[in-house]
Image (cartoon, rainbow, N blue to C red):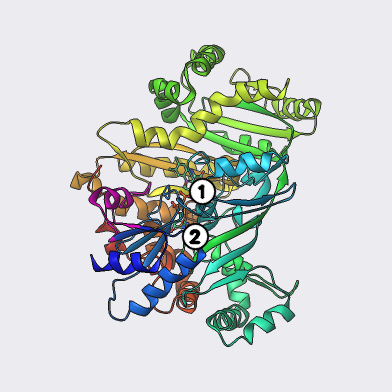
Amino acid sequence: MKLKDDISQLISGEVENTPEVLTTYSHDASLFEVKPEVVAYPKDASDVKALVKYVKDNKAKVPNLSITARSAGTDMSGGAVNDSIVADFNRHFTSITETTKTTAHAQPGVFYRDFEKATLEHGALMPSYPASRELCTIGGMVNNNSGGEKSLEYGKTENFVTELKVVLADGNEVTMAPLTKAQLDIKRKLSTFEGEVYRKTFDLVDKHYDAIKAAKPHVTKNSTGYNLWDVWDRDTGIFDLTKLVVGAQGTLGLTTDIKFRLVAARPHSGLLVAFLHDIDHLGEVINVVLKHKPATFESFDDVTLWLSIKFMPYFLKMLGPVKFIQLLIGLIPDGFMLLHGLPKLILMVEFNGESVEEVRTKIKALHKELDLKHSYYEITAEEEDDTEFKSQKYWIMRRQSFQLLRKKVKDKHTAPFIDDLVVNPEYLPKFLPEMRKIIKKYQLFATIAGHMGDGNFHIIPLMKIEDPKELAKIRPAMQETNELVLKYHGVLSGEHNDGMIRGPWLERAYGQEIYGYFKDVKNIFDPQGIFNPHKKANADWDWTMGHIRQSF
Ligand SMILES: Cc1cc2nc3c(=O)[nH]c(=O)nc-3n(C[C@H](O)[C@H](O)[C@H](O)COP(=O)(O)OP(=O)(O)OC[C@H]3O[C@@H](n4cnc5c(N)ncnc54)[C@H](O)[C@@H]3O)c2cc1C
């Protein structure tokens, strides 16, 4: 009770600890359950500062005290749960300050769906939105360094953040943006905690410059570890702490304000869908597709397709009856395609362009070169709305696959523990059959969907977690998968981040030296360990497995 009373006196936002609230906040979209003591809803930056100062001042007396930021709580790694204070940004940090054709300025608790409406009014887009685009916030996207279907062309959220306001571990709010060396030197001279952060971080990344640069994974997307390699560039002379905070899951500080750069939304797009009945030649297919430089290259498997067909009524609820009937009619040609048997993999390749003609030319060129006989058909952009509608059924299946599993499959639960691996497309022909063997060996009933162009796969087993036999599969199956990913020079997470589930594997993935620098960074920013404990470099496997979800 004391914690709630203390905090209530300090902040103007609400503080709650009813059993219902605590149960809701015990979960995100991960495998875990961690019950907070209180949930605080800061109204503004002063509230966030007061919360952090309270935790800092009382940490020595109450060692378990800590603070975890939470926005929409759709994190799949256990990043948004905590056993002490959870600070919810989704209630009050919801203002969009300004949007222009090229920039946006907003608070972290804004839902991406609302943010996008505002940017599209200027014909602009922040293109790193995830499949959870209807559910998540921009603060969660920044702190997970999220990516999605457009990341193949544009990269992840890290490429679009230009400035952040962050409350540091001393309880002060600072502004972070790319700095020249001269600007950095001014920061390093400050006698404040901010100055200390700049001094120590620069010393770390400059002293171990070559080792840190060499540790950057050679994949097109990565959300594991701390992004140390992008902070300091001796060639450009730019030092940028936003690169470190983006993707840090609130373990280095709390984000209160975000500025983004935007790209122009392309007026026309078209989708080529390929039904692959035989995946032996997947490697060649991928190489051909990538040569054509598509805007997106997504895929989902036969299990996802089958579940989508089985749970069509779920889509009815989501779309409303008129759109659902249109969707069913739209599916008739696909029904005929399915008479050839359920394809093993559905590939979705999207092209953008300034005109319908441009899009159609791109699709036709790929169409011709793929030469997949009857296992494909194409959708071209006749007009914007039409295209959007025709392709919508595939996007729904692709984007909603995980949500469908979470909501609809009875007596089994989604178990995201090998949910986000990345292996460069060149290795996929060898990697995928070996991956399938692991899935078979552990008898995991898993759907596979993903961002094919980046070699980023979401493998989500459905399990009875409460059954000890099922639970016992997690560690060995994860170990074998991780070793396989590392054998092919991949990373364990392209988008979903480390949290509790992958944090314990960081040392294995990066080696002792780089893992040591991750720990150093955490200590520089958070010397008392007040921010989001048990995640990323401070995760511990036993603690993680001690918090497997018990209630559903
Ligand atoms: C159906 C489904 C599909 C998904 N698909 C994708 C996908 O395609 N790509 C992808 O990248 N992810 C995906 N995810 C994971 C997740 O939705 C995204 O990472 C999303 O960006 C998280 O946003 P959120 O608002 O829910 O954040 P939360 O879950 O609330 O938080 C995410 C992390 O950021 C931290 N955080 C939140 N706000 C702040 C703040 N103000 N200051 C400091 N730290 C903060 C939290 O502590 C946590 O560690 C998916 C999840 C679901 C359920």
Q: Quadrant of the C terminus?
A: top left
Tell me residue 106's x, y (percent).
60, 53
Give the class, few, some or many, for how many residues have Cα within 10 Å of label 1's Cα (few <14, many ≥20). many
- Depth check: 223 or 513 in front? 223
Tell me residue 94's x, y (percent).
53, 50
Q: Mark 1 is on which residue type?
A: Thr
Q: Which mark is residue 137?
A: 1
Decide if ligand 1 comes within 8 Å of the CB at mark 1: yes
Q: Secondary structure at mark 2?
A: loop
Residue tagged by mark 2? 224
Instruction: Name the front one of labels 1 and 2.
Output: 1
Q: Mark 2 is on which residue type?
A: Thr
Q: Which residues are magenta?
A: 15-37
Tell me residue 361's x, y (percent).
78, 27
Prevailing secondary structure of the magenta residues: loop
Tell me residue 530's x, y (percent).
39, 72
